[in-house]
Image (tube, rainbow, N blue to C red):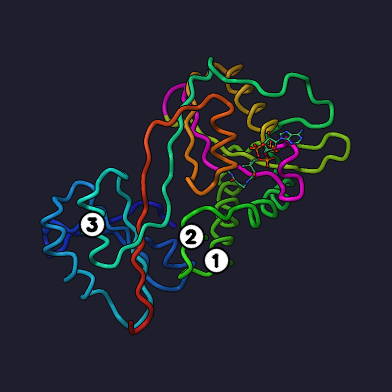
Amino acid sequence: MSFELTVQSFPAPDGPVHYAAIPWDSDLYGFPFYELKCQDTPHASLAQHLPTWLAELPAGCPCLIYSKITPGAVPLAQVLAGSGFYPVETLMEFHLHLARLSTIIHRKSHSARLRLAKPADQASVTAIAASAFAADRYHLDPHLPADKADQRFIQWISRSFASREPIFVLEDTPCGQVLGFVQCRETAPKTMDVTLGAVNKDIQQTGAGVLMYQLLFIEFQSRGYREAITRVSLHNIGGIKLTLRLGFTVRSAVTTLHWFRPAGG
Ligand SMILES: CC(C)(COP(=O)(O)OP(=O)(O)OC[C@H]1O[C@@H](n2cnc3c(N)ncnc32)[C@H](O)[C@@H]1OP(=O)(O)O)[C@@H](O)C(=O)NCCC(=O)NCCS
């Protein structure tokens, strides 16, 4: 499935409401998902056309629309809220000059190491990803079934293994068990973007998360990388504390609002 979106305008052909169907989420949930792209739309134009666009969406099935705005875009948020959108999640983007990494664990671990995942690790990584996440907007929105939200992460891991995107695992060296995983990619020269990571639920709060992320950033420092970015949900206090502890600072934030209409609603 292609991850390219086709942006359309309402009223066609060049009205001010810009939206795109989201095929992968529509497929997973079995009803249409759309992204409303309104960050650059004047709020008066949005207020004029949004109710008509919403009224014209197919009514025979449920429908979910999401829209991402900066938290400071209050007039835009007011227009969206006036049409039934509700805030679901705020993602903070964090940034670190890798030279300023704060190392927390100073003794070398003899019981755990970070290594690149092998195809044989897919089942262990999938098992961790299937149960670790709870603070993303798909889990937070009560209109969306939690098992499908877990499924999204399972599909994410499956695509990453299929396309051989690098995933690192934290391995318990005595028994070879995978304790956690973290995925990152280069988004600009010498800049790493940490896109997804988690440790096994059973060993959270024991220092495994700190160790895994610290080892990852040390590894990328030694590869000559200079910057790291990552995004953490405001609802994930553990993740935020960990990110700040490693020396990251906040760069920006994005709030996602949802609009949901049940079938026939
Ligand atoms: C976020 C996440 C990776 C953190 O991993 P973790 O293993 O639970 O975190 P740690 O144990 O290293 O640190 C958590 C707490 O334990 C404390 N701790 C660290 N080492 C410890 C040790 N040896 N013994 C006891 N406590 C310890 C830390 O000080 C920290 O305290 P805090 O509650 O004040 O923040 C993990 O909770 C997770 O997988 N969450 C779900 C997925 C997710 O949110 N991913 C995004 C991450 S940014």
Q: Which mark is residue 148?
A: 1
Q: Is residue 42 above or below residue 84?
A: above
Residue located beneath label 2 in the image: 138
Say which element carries label 3: helix
**Mark with earlier residue (3, 2):** 3
Q: Which mark is residue 78?
A: 3
From this viewpoint, which residue is outermost toward the right? Answer: 174
Ligand 1 quadrant in view: top right
Say which element carries label 1: helix
Say which element carries label 2: helix
Residue 101: % across, % down = 57, 20
Q: Which residues are magenta?
A: 188-208
Residue 93 location, quadrant: top left
Residue 153: % across, % down = 57, 55
Q: CA distance from mark 2 to mark 1?
A: 8 Å
Q: Tell me if 167 is positioned left or right of 24 in this view.
A: right
Of the residues tagged 3 and 1, which is closer to the observer? 3
Q: Residue at x 63, y 31 (%)?
A: 213
Residue 246 location, quadrant: top right
